[in-house]
Image: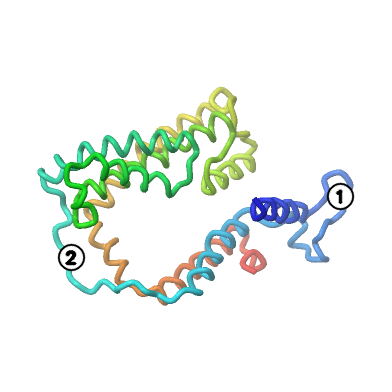
């Protein structure tokens, strides 16, 4: 509670930076003209979720084992599909309910894994290669990512940080998330629905043939990943307004 109140206060202070609407006076700009319009949404998002994550990770010593062996057998067999089908259905149902109820994001996978392990005839096989232990949590995670739009688009309440950023982007474009968004902006609502189907289809088409490349990313040490992530963050920030102040 104390941290939440502190972050609310910090957010209000950051939101006060800029030009006053009624008087036109500059507030907390310290004579810097780039702050006359306030702190940019993209700069704030990149700083909080990009730069901060890198700094936090650099404080910890890399303890993972770098993948060096050759990986094969990415495609699922028919027996794997038959074994995973019930787990996928149960995980999808679990993730859908938790996504609507606005539970913590990491609770989707853990809850689905726990349910699958409790209902399995061979719980001792979990953690030793049981495909249901992977299928159920991932299905729950994917389902929750889509049903979490329900409280945002119907009540205007973002259930997680990512959708809070999306709500902010909607407000920037003059769209108020809430009960009336379906009637006032039907193209946005149905566009989101269609994008979920199209996005899942594209993910299947990309991930199945390229899964070997994604797994190979595990062989890249963190000391090489962090500079690359930092570089892409800076490129994205600069490309918005072609201004180095946004990077700073």
Answer yes or no: is residue 202 visible.
Answer: no
Locate residue 137, reporting x and y percent.
32, 46
Q: Nearer the viewer, residue 233 or 104?
A: 104
Residue tagged 2: 71
Locate residue 65, reporting x and y percent.
30, 73
Q: Nearer the viewer, residue 170 or 126?
A: 126
Image quadrant in which you'd find residue 181: top right
- Marks counted in the figure total 2
Q: Residue furthest top?
A: 183
Q: How is the image coloured?
A: rainbow
Up-down relation of residue 55 to residue 105 (above or below): below
Disc 2 residue crowd, few under 14, some 14–19, many 20+, Cα 10 Å: few
Locate residue 28, reporting x and y percent.
81, 60
Residue tagged 1: 24
* Residue in the picture at 59% in, 34% down: 156
Give the secondary structure at mark 1. Answer: loop
The answer to whether residue 54 is left or right of residue 198 is right
Give the secondary structure at mark 2. Answer: loop
Locate residue 209, reporting x and y percent.
22, 54
* Residue in the picture at 50% in, 29% down: 187
Up-down relation of residue 84 to residue 242 (above or below): above
Compute the Cα span from label 2 to label 1: 62 Å
N-terminal of the pair, mark 2 or mark 1, is 1
Disc 1 residue crowd, few under 14, some 14–19, many 20+, Cα 10 Å: few
């Amino acid at each position: 509670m104390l941290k939440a109140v502190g972050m609310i206060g910090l957010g209000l202070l950051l939101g006060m930076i800029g030009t006053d609407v009624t008087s036109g006076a500059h507030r907390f700009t310290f004579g810097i003209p780039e702050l006359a319009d306030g702190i940019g949404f993209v700069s704030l998002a990149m700083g909080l979720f990009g730069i901060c994550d890198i700094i936090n990770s650099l404080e910890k010593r890399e303890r993972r084992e770098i993948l060096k062996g050759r990986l094969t057998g990415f495609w699922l067999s028919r027996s794997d599909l038959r074994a995973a089908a019930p787990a996928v259905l149960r995980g999808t149902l679990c993730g859908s309910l938790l996504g609507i109820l606005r539970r913590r994001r990491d609770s989707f996978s853990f809850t689905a894994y726990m349910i699958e392990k409790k209902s399995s005839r061979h719980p001792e096989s979990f953690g030793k290669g049981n495909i249901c232990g992977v299928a159920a949590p991932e299905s729950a995670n994917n389902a929750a990512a889509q049903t979490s739009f329900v409280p945002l688009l119907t009540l205007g309440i973002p259930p997680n940080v990512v959708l809070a950023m999306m709500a902010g982007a909607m407000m920037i474009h003059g769209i108020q998330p809430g009960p009336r968004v379906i009637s006032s902006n039907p193209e946005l609502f149905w566009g989101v629905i269609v994008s979920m189907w199209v996005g899942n289809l594209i993910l299947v088409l990309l991930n199945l043939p390229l899964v070997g490349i994604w797994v190979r990313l595990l062989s890249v040490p963190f000391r090489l990943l962090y500079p690359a992530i930092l570089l892409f963050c800076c490129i994205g920030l600069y490309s918005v307004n072609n201004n180095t102040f946004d990077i700073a």
